[in-house]
Amino acid sequence: MSPRPASMREDRGRVRIPADVERPDKLLAGLTARQLAILGVAAVVLWGAYAGTRHLVPTVVFAVVAIPVAAAATMLALGRFEGVAADRWVSAAWRHHRSPRRLVPAADGVPATPAFLPVDVGPPPDPLRLPFAGIGDDGVIDLGAEGAALVCRASAVTFSLRTPAEQEALVAGFARWLNGLDRPAQLLVRAEPVDLTPTIDALLDTAPALPHPALEAAARDHAAFLADLAARRDLLRREVLVVLRHASPTGRAGAESAARLHRRAAEATAALAAAGVTLGVLDATAAAACLARALDPAGDLRPGACGAVVSGTDVPVTLARERGDRR
């Protein structure tokens, strides 16, 4: 028996997961149940209309009306707009058209319009419904009937600069945490603009107080470099968040939910430390700022220093050293 190829030996123990696992099943002629339902309803309606009017309307006249209807049903079932199915795109557009445009924060409802105002002031605004009810002092987000959530910020890992043995150890540590999950958890990677103006101003303000002229010149050169970098490029800050969820049996977040979430955060911190990831729980202020940035991505730029943009700088790089030793 001939030995197995090296590629087959390397793939032992690996499981390939298809990227389209969430695609709907094809039932007939490559069509999904949703597409078959749209086409079937359109066909039944057209056939019923033809059967009811064939003695009253000529076939040519009926075809002139039926062909655009059939084409619209076909486009609705098979078409796609910007990667979204046509029927879902139309449904979303209709909901957006019907949804109110003026929303105000009113937990107790919008009061009625005063009687002394004219009638043509327009419809009153609708209350703004946020997906969360509040944030506790410990950073636990009250999701109302959905339970509670806790947001943690994770550091990045310089994976490509590690040796193969270190990469395997990091992957194994991360896999152990994933395999140990028994409650919902979300991994979210966000990119948001960064404003380097506070960092540049801080460098220019502290430069004259440095103990040596060379240090002052270096600080000013670094400030000029940051200003030129911000002027030439759109700087982004990458943020990795781990969101832990807990569904309360009572439908409201309480002390028990907060204790369970913080215990899960401590377990995740210890487990991800083996993967080289530092996990920190966001307090009430940081969680509120994170939610505000998520709800208003086009808001004010986030101030940040260069050290905050690049995380994991305290971890030594071993791959380059080993390559240098091999030379």
Image (cartoon, rainbow, N blue to C red):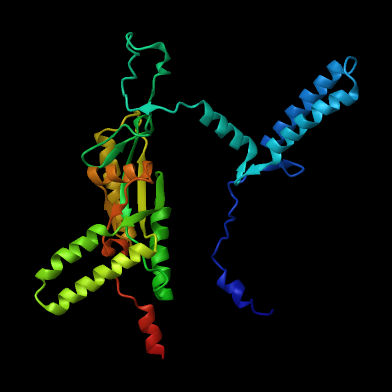
Across and down, in percent, residue 99 comes to: 48, 27
Quarter location, residue 94: top right
244 and 227: which is toward the camera: 227
Across and down, in percent, residue 281 comes to: 27, 50
Residue 274 appears in the rendering = no
Compared to residue 86, the image places residue 123 above or below, namely above
Across and down, in percent, residue 90 comes to: 61, 34
Across and down, in percent, residue 289 comes to: 28, 45
Quarter location, residue 10: bottom right
Compared to residue 22, the image places residue 175 above or below, namely below
Q: Looking at the image, which residue sits at the far top?
A: 115
248 displayed left or right of 55: left
150 and 2: which is toward the camera: 150
Of the 4 image quadrants, the one containing the C terminus is: bottom left
Q: How many marks?
A: 0
Q: What residue appears at the point 81 percent right and 20 percent down from the top-left corner?
A: 49
Residue 113 appears in the rendering = yes
268 displayed left or right of 220: right
55 displayed left or right of 137: right
Of the 4 image quadrants, the one containing the N terminus is: bottom right
241 and 291: which is toward the camera: 291
